[in-house]
Amino acid sequence: MERRALGRARAQLLPDATCTAEPKPRTHEPCLLKRCHKHKKLQWLVSAWSKCSATCDRGTQKRFLKCAEKYVSGKYRELASRKCLHVPKPDLELARPCALFPCPAHPLQAAAGPPRGGWVASPWSQCSASCGGGVQRRSVQCMAGGRPASDCSPHQKPESSLACNTHFCTIPEKKDTFCKDYFHWCHLVPQHGMCSHKFYGKQCCKTCSKSNLPESKWKDGSYPGLPVPLTQEKQ
């Protein structure tokens, strides 16, 4: 193989053996311009037709082309459209007319027909009792277009009565009109814990009924500040 030797004055071809003092330059090297396209895997897929844009007269149906990659398993993965710019698009119709029959003159009346009845309820009344269980009532009528009707379903009729205020009523405490104090020293009875005594408890009923003081521990029968009961005087 021959190579060129460059000089200042002229170039002369020499044998390779004369250039052993210097490393021989490479004659080729790798290069990468861009990735090769996956022509066999990337392709355009066609979607199904969309619903008609109108229910009567003239409407339009559309479908779309989608860029997809096919796997070895046979499944597809949707990609951005720019990935398939190098793949030729199929020549397909992507829009077509639909619903060519004329619309009826009165579409609402033709579709719905005469108005059907529905249950209409009035507001609830006040409860018939404040405690112990009462009843609230309301009127429920079958109406259609503001007029009474008879085609309402009985199974869908709302309740016309409702239990209310079912809590127990409080019973006011009975006051004993005969429970009163008969002596001016009755305030001393609960202080000495003698409200349970037959004489003192009865004569000072009003004061003892309001007292929470403990009973007396006096054992000798003396009650400082209190008169001696008549039962003890007789003894």
Image: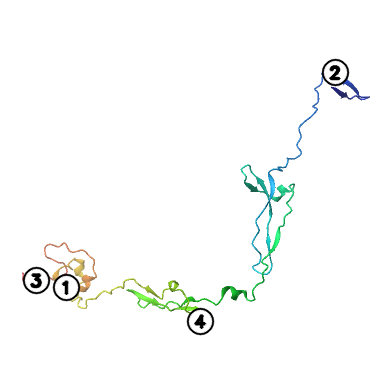
Q: Position of residue 23 (x, y in %)?
A: 80, 22
Disc nearest the viewer among 3 and 2: 2
Q: Quadrant of residue 215?
A: bottom left
Q: Residues within 10 Å of mark 1 (few under 14, many from 20)?
A: some
Q: 69 and 159: which one is in front?
A: 69
- Give residue 147's mark: 4
CA gap between label 3 and label 1 equals 14 Å
CA gap between label 3 and label 4 equals 88 Å
Q: Earlier in the sequence, mark 3 or mark 1?
A: 1
**What residue do we see at 37% from left, 76% from top?**
135
Q: Earlier in the sequence, mark 3 or mark 4?
A: 4
Q: Residues within 10 Å of mark 3 (few under 14, many from 20)?
A: few
Q: Secondary structure at mark 2?
A: helix
CA gap between label 2 and label 1 equals 147 Å
Q: Earlier in the sequence, mark 3 or mark 2?
A: 2
CA gap between label 4 and label 1 equals 75 Å
- Give residue 202's mark: 1
Q: Are marks 3 and 2 in contact (CB under 8 Å)?
A: no
Q: 167 and 205: which one is in front?
A: 167
Q: Which residue is mark 3?
A: 231
Q: Secondary structure at mark 1?
A: helix
Quadrant where the N terminus sits is top right
Q: Position of residue 107 (x, y in %)?
A: 62, 74
Disc nearest the viewer among 3 and 1: 1
* Three-letter amino acid code of the residue under disc 2: Thr
* Three-letter amino acid code of the residue under disc 4: Arg
